[in-house]
Amino acid sequence: MPDAAVLSLGLSPCPNDTYIFHALLHGLVEFPFHVKPHMADVEELNALAKSGALDVTKLSLGVVPHIMRDYALLSSGAALGWGVGPLVVARNPLPEEAWRRARVAVPGLMTTANLLLDLHGGFQGERREMLFSDVMPAVRRGGADMGVIIHEGRFTYERQGLVKILDLGEWWESAFHVPLPLGAVAVRRDVPGQTALAVQKAVAESLAYANGHPGASEKFVRAHAQEMEEKVMREHIRTFVTGFSQDLGLAGRAAIEALVARAAKLRGREMPAQGLFL
């Protein structure tokens, strides 16, 4: 850390992140450090984590096998739960035998969505990497046979004329009997221990503030939600901000360990001796 009084913080403009971090970024919870926010698409945050550029950042669980020796995961701020998984969509229903060779648009190769495709094993065709917001348009115009949609896409794909092929969250839950971890907040391991614990506490308190003051973050969330409808924005928060976001607990940690262990094996990496968590 070049300056112990300043912490760089990566977050996405998605409503679940802006809702969770609003109070922390606006000085509404006690935190003895200055926060320098970097707001970006989650795949950009994943790339920054791979280079160790940010002190603290939200990231996809899909990138954790690549960064777990340099970052530790916090117990607060995660996106994890039941019924939260990415969806595989297409223009028309496709039989399972067609999945293997299909061209699939994905919202980043380091995302949890892409990792789930690999773990499933039934999708062996070309992957076309793009911004999450470009996936549905690519499928609609025939630039890909299928697309994996995340974030608010699960609430809007039908009005885009697309059909659901597979709910990757339902597949994960059925196969492994644990909730699906999508993202978590990570702190670089060279951040002093007491500072890292203060970050973990502040993120939890920031979410508690948001839950206790439902209208306080609304303008901030709306400002970064682009053209998202109010109803979709609220559904997004209800879906991706869960009890696990406040504190992973034993069940949340076990779910993350289950996903990361399988991903590490798939990527040919060893789990860190010091463990995944702060």
Image: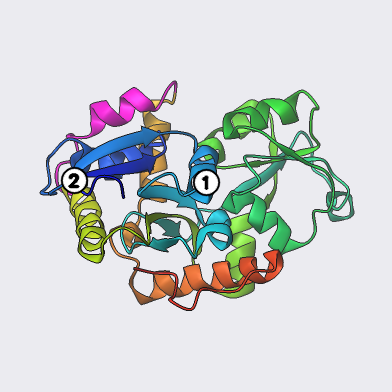
Confirm whether residue 265 shows in the render: yes
Identify which residue, 197 or 97, lies in the foreground: 197
Res 178 visible: no
Q: What residue appears at the point 77 percent right and 23 percent down from the top-left corner?
A: 141
Query: How many marks do you count on the picture?
Result: 2
Locate residue 18 relative to residue 207 in the image: left or right.
right
Residue at (72% x, 58% y) in the render: 118
Residue 218 lies within the magenta run: yes
- Residue at 56% over, 67% down: 260
Q: Which residue is mark 2?
A: 5
Local secondary structure at mark 1: helix
**Amino acid of disc 2:** Ala
Q: Which residue is mark 1?
A: 46
Give the amino acid at mark 1.
Asn
The span picked out in magenta is: 211-227
Examine the image and state in which quarter residue 214 appears. top left
Q: Position of residue 134 (x, y in %)?
A: 63, 28
Residue 112 in magenta stretch? no
| Circle 2 residues within 10 Å: few <14, some 14–19, many ≥20 | few
The colour scheme of the drawn protein is rainbow
From the image, state whether disc 2 or disc 1 is nearer to you. 2
* Quadrant assignment for the C terminus: bottom left
| Spatial CA span between label 2 and label 1 | 24 Å
Left or right, 104 with respect to 34, comes to right
Residue 52 placement (x, y as % from top left): 46, 49
User: Residue 172, percent across and down?
Assistant: 61, 65
Q: Tell me the quarter of the picture where residue 149 sits.
A: top right
